[in-house]
Amino acid sequence: MTTETKTVPGRQITSYQEKANDVHSLLQQMKPQLEMALPKHLTADRLARVALTAIRKTPRLMGCTRESLAGAIMVAAQLGLEPDGVLGHFYLIPYRNGKTGKDECQGMIGYRGMVDLARRSGQISTIYATVVREDDAFDYQLGTEPKITHRPQMDTTKPVTHAYAVAKLTDGSTQFDVMSKDEVESIRSRSRAKDDGPWITDWDEMAKKTVVRRLYKMLPVSVEIHRAVLREELQERGIEATGDLIDFESVPPTLEAEQGNGSVHMPDDEPDLPAPQPKPEPKQQASEMLRAYIKGIGLTEQQACAYKGVKALSDIPADSQTMQELKAHAKELHEHANIVGSAQPTMPI
């Protein structure tokens, strides 16, 4: 007769095999939820395999709390990004929570993941980012005829001075954003993962991801993606994100992994899944997208409505031409405020 040994819930798991079984069990329990969250191009089985491989490559992740690990993987699932940490779509990064004294996992969208999300909108034909190095021929201008010129010297040993992102929309218009190295480092300094993961191993990629994320404020991407990017930014800075994008409470409360033959015991009852949220109407979705955009360029809703001569934000079309006009208006207001000595916040370039 074979004797089966089960882990006791709440007991300290110490051995590598125990931790591996524990993580495997977690991923198996999550599969029904992953299936509901994933887009058609990904399956729960593949995401679970990719996540398990990434976790095994970084053994410290096995010691992270189950809730944080499950939450990070669920974020990747809802965004439809593979958390392999190799292709640069999505990273699983361990960090020490100073308040609890425990290791937790943070999910982080990579540069290629940001590009992938932007392209899904159907309104962006091309989007890319790159870094500028010392001695590159680089110049850009804003105003009524914004443009960038960059002739790289192809010497990757030179230090980085800037990062920029460019997006070409399907209507033929172009949006871009530029950040200095100091601006990128300022963002990095607020990240809980500033001393670990891709900020150490792939600084250039993270710089490109950072400027693309800021460019998102000017792009016609979906409200859901705007929320996902905002939540990721808040979590990266250690700020608790609230809202209806991800239900972290739906993670199963206990694990029971059978030892010996490495098989996994699944609980009989699956946790209740959160009820699906109704999708906003197209006009409402456009208004929310426009609201996020004008906030990103430093305008208030009242200023935007007054400029367009309408009473409500819903009366303003959320097209590329309107966004360009509002951006130019915001710049004019900002320059005027600087002239008269007003202390308004700096508008993102």
Image: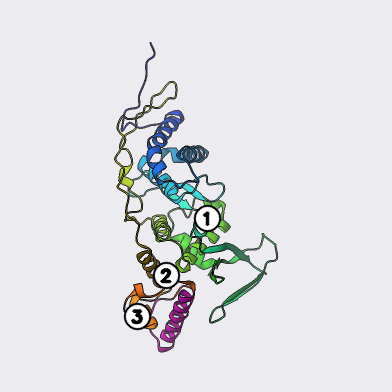
| Crowdedness near tag 2: few (<14), some (14–19) or many (≥20) residues, C-alpha within 10 Å | many
From the image, tell me which residue sits under label 1.
116
- Classify residue 241 as left or right of residue 148: left
- Whole-number angstrom distance, CA of label 2 to CA of label 3: 17 Å
Q: Nearer the viewer, mark 1 or mark 3?
A: 3
Q: What residue type is labelled 2?
A: Tyr
The furthest residue to the front: 282
Is 260 situated above or below 175? above
Query: What label does residue 259 carry, if any?
Result: none
Quadrant location, the N terminus? top left
Task: Tell me the residue at 37%/15% (across/down).
Answer: 3
Contact, mark 2 vs mark 3 (Cβ under 8 Å) = no
From the image, tell me which residue sits under label 2.
293
- Classify residue 13 as left or right of residue 45: left
Q: Residue 213 or 105: which is nearer the viewer?
A: 213
Q: What element carries label 1?
A: helix
The spot of residue 177 in percent (x, y) is 53, 70
Query: What label does residue 310 carry, if any?
Result: 3
Report whether residue 95 is seen: no
Contact, mark 2 vs mark 1 (Cβ under 8 Å) = no
| Crowdedness near tag 1: few (<14), some (14–19) or many (≥20) residues, C-alpha within 10 Å | some
Count of number-bearing discs: 3
Which tag, 2 or 1, sits closer to the chain's start? 1
Within the magenta stretch, is there residue 160? no
Main SS of the magenta segment? helix
Colouring method of the image:
rainbow
Q: Which amino acid does label 1 sit on?
A: Asp
Which tag, 2 or 3, sits closer to the chain's start? 2
Rendered image quadrant of residue 281 = bottom left
Q: Is mark 2 on a helix, strand or loop?
A: helix
Within the magenta stretch, is there residue 336? yes
